[in-house]
Image (cartoon, helix red, strand yellow):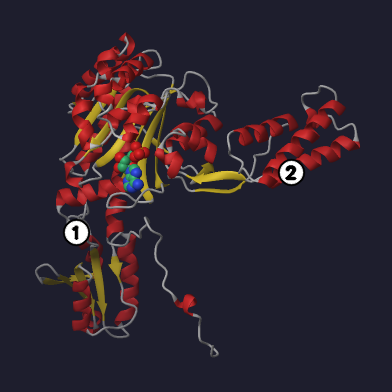
């Protein structure tokens, strides 16, 4: 190969990874508008933002989303570079190792297995040497124990823990709630988040491997149906604010630990009947034993007539759950939020309780779910948090919400430029620089060309950039101390003094509102 020639593979073009995409201007303006609107709506309901890390211990997601789900089974981006967290005592450290090993959070390699077994052996030796002490780190009497403790720390440091890019954020929010003792805060804690999530799904329109969610969670001791209704109303407010009118809100109640198991048994018995079982697909047949509730949300067309006739959970709720559901419906009606009951909206995990809901939009095509949510009263406790903390939340798909806004308005995102400054001549340049700064201070979007342009070229460029006004500063303007402003929509041109400039561009001349404006 000749000097300077690069091998072929060094010259290849890079592309975004399958299932990920760049969101470019002007679309980013619409994204920013949407996020600002969503923040505004959520803050008006007194929700405050939480930002959690993008990766967490794999075990957090496995436990909260459920090992039987597609998300945990097939779709998580997991890598092994995490470390076991430091603990207050040796005993707790070894217990953390044992639990991570049991749960599979530590990668099952031969080397890790040897390390874990050595840690166990040394710990046993330390314990027998130090008597039955519990707070072993404080028993520094002998040099032998010191070196054994150091050896355990070294081995623990070499164990690599599995981490996962978050496929959703509810688990992280609950983890943070517990970690920071937020149950001590007055009333229910209302948190929202905005950010990317990662799932290794088969990419298609509306389904990505890195996608964005906006979600909100209410955590606390109360599970009043008004909380559920207000959370749902917040979503319909957002849809309204975005002027997306074509959507459907589906609601259901999936009961609680006392009534759901009885219903599940009833459902299983029904599904086992040979005339029904034989008509089910392979996945549903398997789920009759593992998780019959999930047969309800099957999308297979040939199973639909069977599902229609299955017993509905809403008809088998206990008194409390039934009262909760009735109250929810009254609360929604009071708020003038239209809803449709859907017995098929189920969740397969034990900690989900009572209210579930989904918002779909017919303008979206195959991936029509805009948003999903529900109560998860048992989750905080299951993640090691205090007893009796209830929770409800939703997550909306930002990618799909944006598609719905674009569809509803038939808008093409544009990037409006407020003012293009056409300056001509050395003498005009300092004035152009100064006025650009003045107008930017006023929050206008201003383009100041870095080099001098001929008048006609400058106008052409301003037009192509979609500018609303051109501020013209040439020799004449400098000599007369008057500026020229040209409105591009109709070509109307007028002269104004520099003092009048700021007032001229104040709204309504440059009003800014609404998606795509
Ligand atoms: P889930 O956490 O699965 O209930 O999803 C909540 C919402 O996130 C869905 O209703 C979708 O709008 C959106 N969503 C889920 N998965 C994806 C994905 N792979 N790509 C784009 N949006 C998604």
Residue 271 in view = yes
In this view, 205 is above or below 295: below
Position of the C terminus, as image quadrant, is: bottom left
Q: CA distance from mark 2 to mark 1?
A: 57 Å
Residue 180 in view = no
Residue at x 35%, y 42% (from the top left corner): 214
318 and 405: which is toward the camera = 318
Residue 76's spot in the image, x, y percent? 46, 45
Residue 185's spot in the image, x, y percent? 48, 26
Residue receiving disc 2: 155
Residue at x 63%, y 32% (from the top left corner): 99
Ligand 1 shows up in which quadrant of the image?
A: top left
User: Residue 448 occupies which quadrant of the picture?
Assistant: bottom left
In this view, 418 is above or below 66: below
Helix, strand or loop at mark 1: loop
Residue receiving disc 1: 412
128 relative to 480 in the view: left or right: right
């Amino acid at each position: 190969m000749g000097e300077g020639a690069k091998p072929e593979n060094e010259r290849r073009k890079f592309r975004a990874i399958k299932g990920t995409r760049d969101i470019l201007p002007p679309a980013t303006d619409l994204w920013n508008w949407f996020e600002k609107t969503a923040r505004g709506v959520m803050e008006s309901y007194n929700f405050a933002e939480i930002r959690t890390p993008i990766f967490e211990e794999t075990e957090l997601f496995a436990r909260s989303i459920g090992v039987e789900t597609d998300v945990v089974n097939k779709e998580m981006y997991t890598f092994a570079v995490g470390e076991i967290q430091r603990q207050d005592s040796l005993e707790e450290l070894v217990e953390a190792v044992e639990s991570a090993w049991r749960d599979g959070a530590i990668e099952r390699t031969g080397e890790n297995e040897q390390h874990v077994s050595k840690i166990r052996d040394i710990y046993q030796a330390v314990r027998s040497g130090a008597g039955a002490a519990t707070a072993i780190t404080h028993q520094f009497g002998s040099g032998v124990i010191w070196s054994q403790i150091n050896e355990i720390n070294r081995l623990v440091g070499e164990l690599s823990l599995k981490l996962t890019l978050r496929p959703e954020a509810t688990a992280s929010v609950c983890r943070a709630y517990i970690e920071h003792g937020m149950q001590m805060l007055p009333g229910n804690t209302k948190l929202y988040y905005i950010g990317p999530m990662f799932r290794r799904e088969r990419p298609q329109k509306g389904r990505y491997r890195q996608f964005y969610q906006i979600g909100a969670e209410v955590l606390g001791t109360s599970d009043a149906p008004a909380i559920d209704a207000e959370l749902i109303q917040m979503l319909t407010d957002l849809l309204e604010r975005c002027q997306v009118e074509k959507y459907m809100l589906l609601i259901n109640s999936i009961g609680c630990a006392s009534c759901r198991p009885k219903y599940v048994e009833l459902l299983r018995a029904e599904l086992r009947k040979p005339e029904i079982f034989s008509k089910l697909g392979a996945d549903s047949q398997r789920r009759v034993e593992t998780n019959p509730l999930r047969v309800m949300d099957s999308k297979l067309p040939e199973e639909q007539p069977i599902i229609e006739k299955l017993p509905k959970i809403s008809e088998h709720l206990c008194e409390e759950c039934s009262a909760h559901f009735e109250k929810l419906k009254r609360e929604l009606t009071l708020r003038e939020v239209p809803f449709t009951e859907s017995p098929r909206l189920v969740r397969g995990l034990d900690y989900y309780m009572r209210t579930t809901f989904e918002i779909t939009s017919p303008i979206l095509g195959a991936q029509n779910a805009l948003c999903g949510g529900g109560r998860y009263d048992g989750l905080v406790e299951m993640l090691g948090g205090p007893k009796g903390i209830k929770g409800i939340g939703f997550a909306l798909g930002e990618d799909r919400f944006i598609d719905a806004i674009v569809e509803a308005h038939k808008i093409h995102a544009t990037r409006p430029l407020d003012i293009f400054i056409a300056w001509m001549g050395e003498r005009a340049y300092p004035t152009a620089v100064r006025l650009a700064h003045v107008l930017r201070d006023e929050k206008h979007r201003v383009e100041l060309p870095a080099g001098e342009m001929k008048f006609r070229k400058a106008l052409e460029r301003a037009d192509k950039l979609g500018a609303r006004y051109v501020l013209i500063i040439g020799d004449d303007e400098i000599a007369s101390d008057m500026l020229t402003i040209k409105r591009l929509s109709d070509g109307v041109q007028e002269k104004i003094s520099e003092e009048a400039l700021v007032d001229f561009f104040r709204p309504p001349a440059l009003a800014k509102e609404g998606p795509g404006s």
